[in-house]
Image: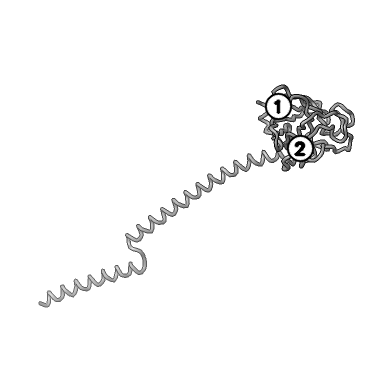
Amino acid sequence: MNSSKLITSSLLAVLCLFGASFATAGVNGPGPQSIKHHSKLNLEGLLANNSDGEVASKEATSDESADSHDNHGDASDSDAGNVKLLVAVVTPTAGNDTSGTVYFAKSADGLKVWGTIKGLSPGNHGFHVHQYGDITAADGTSAGGHFNPHHQPHAGPDAKHRHVGDLGNITANKDGVAEFSFIDTKLSIQGANSILGRGLIVHQGADDLTSQPTGAAGPRVGMAVIGVANPDDLKK
């Protein structure tokens, strides 16, 4: 009997010791399952952070590449000295059908001007660079008068004293299409005679090259703003 009690007491003591050990482990630190759980969370968090970092890095690289391209474009486009080609896309004024595209490119003798304009009546039509690149008015009058920075009288394109914007006439064929190409010695892309940002106007009638102040060319049938062209257009 005494031996049985002694064995029982010993077993109870051992169980108490194990219980105390488990209790201490619960208080002082996580058990094996808890450690495994936290390790999984930490690994997932690390992977997530790494993934976010990779995405952010890729986005930053993409943005830097785009910014680099944009900055290059801004540098070349904002400096008129680097611009070699201008374009004006002609749209009709109210009640007309005039449309077309006109280019201006640097050449050794001045600016080469060429283009095609359609929707005209057969014959000559006054063709001028105007003061403002503003075509908000339906009749084109918001473009102002002829571009005339040196305060000269109106005249033909070959006159020594003329408006810088005096380009004379373009001639439409029987189908109402005018195709033209010429070099003007007064137009420029930079400096006092720069036409960048100015207006381009096609008139209903012919410019007589003498009447003041605009050559009696009649109402405006086509209008455009002269802007910087994509240089790739020169390759077309």
Q: Estimate the spatial distance between the alpha carbons at disc 1 and disc 2, rounded to whole Å.
A: 17 Å
Judging depth in this view, the residue of 92 and 232 nearest the camera is 92
- Looking at marks 1 and 2 on the same chain, the residue that comes earlier in the sequence is marked by 1
In the rendered structure, the answer to whether residue 27 lies left or right of residue 159 reads: left
Name the image quarter holding residue 132.
top right
Front residue of 92/155: it is 92
Tell me: residue 137, above or below residue 166: below
Residue 151 x, y percent position in the rendering? 88, 38
Callout 2: few (<14), some (14-19), or many (20+) C-alpha neighbours within 10 Å? many
Residue that sits furthest to the left in the current view: 1
Where is 65 relative to 42, above or below?
Answer: above
Q: How many marks?
A: 2
Q: Residue at x 66, y 26 (%)?
A: 235
Q: State the residue at coordinates (53%, 44%).
A: 58
Find numbered disc 1 in the image and state the secondary structure of the residue it sits on.
strand
- Amino acid type at image mark 2: Gly
Q: Amino acid at mark 1?
A: Thr
Residue 116, label in figure: 1
For the residue pair 35 and 50, the one nearer the viewer reads as 50
The N terminus: image quadrant: bottom left
Q: Quadrant of the C terminus?
A: top right
Residue 236 higher or lower than 134, as above or below: above
The single residue placed furthest to the front in the displayed view is 95
Q: Which residue is mark 2?
A: 199
The quadrant in which residue 141 appears is: top right
Q: Quadrant of residue 226?
A: top right
Residue at x 47%, y 48% (from the top left corner): 51
